Image (cartoon, helix red, strand yellow):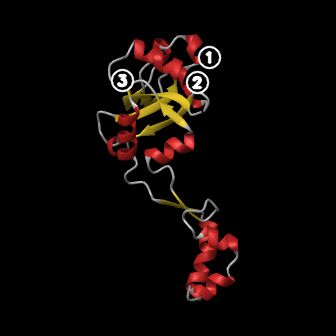
Amino acid sequence: MAKQVMAIKMRSKKGKRKDGKIGFIYPDFDAIVPKEKRGGVRWQEWISDQEHCAGQIVNEKTKADPDGFENVILVDVPFGEAVKAQLPSGVEIIDEAEFAAFYNDSNAGAASYRTDEGIIVALQTIYETQIFDEKVKQKMSAEDLAAIDPDNDAPGIRRNKLKTFTGFKAAKDIEIVGG
């Protein structure tokens, strides 16, 4: 069964934080979410644990915006419900359809394939020194053939399964609730 999470969308900007350091300023979830709903630790520690946070997605298109960038954190339901109860300014709980649109828009420029450079260099040598035809394929090992097949998960050229929300959702085994 897929893990249920809530999607919290917010705008964050770079500035001077409460601790005096320069960094990204987020809403003060420590003041919003009761300590027992975040394991007695600061919210950043709580969501850095994969058990409580399925991920943080930043909309790369908004990163240069002087008013801050859009991002979404996927959190466990108790944390999300606590945020929803006191919804601070600039924060919203979004449903799965809204998150899917955000995710796909944020990753529109992502590469469709991922590569493992060491294997690619070796295979590139084959391409450069021989005509890559059926005779060459017959001489290649199953591992080398798998490495140049983007649909095979072997090290080499792989399809980027996290490029779309559908792939991300399947990889994380999550269901977004609330919103």
Out of 134 and 58, give the one closest to the viewer: 134
Q: Earlier in the sequence, mark 3 or mark 2?
A: 2
Element carrying mark 2: helix
**Amino acid type of the residue that numbered disc 2 sits on in the rendered structure:** Trp
Q: Earlier in the sequence, mark 2 or mark 1?
A: 1
Out of 132 and 29, give the one closest to the viewer: 132
Vertical order, 139 against 122 (above or below): below
**Amino acid type of the residue that numbered disc 3 sits on in the rendered structure:** Val
Does the residue at mark 3 contact the one at mark 1 (Cβ under 8 Å)? Answer: no
**Residue indicated by mark 2:** 46
- x and y, in percent, of residue 103 in the image: 40, 42
Which residue is located at x 44 percent, y 24 percent? 17
Please identify the residue farthest to the front as the structure is shown: 1
Does the residue at mark 2 contact the one at mark 1 (Cβ under 8 Å)? Answer: yes
Q: Quadrant of residue 66?
A: top left
- x and y, in percent, of residue 101 in the image: 35, 41
Gap in angstroms between the C-alphas marked 2 and 1: 7 Å
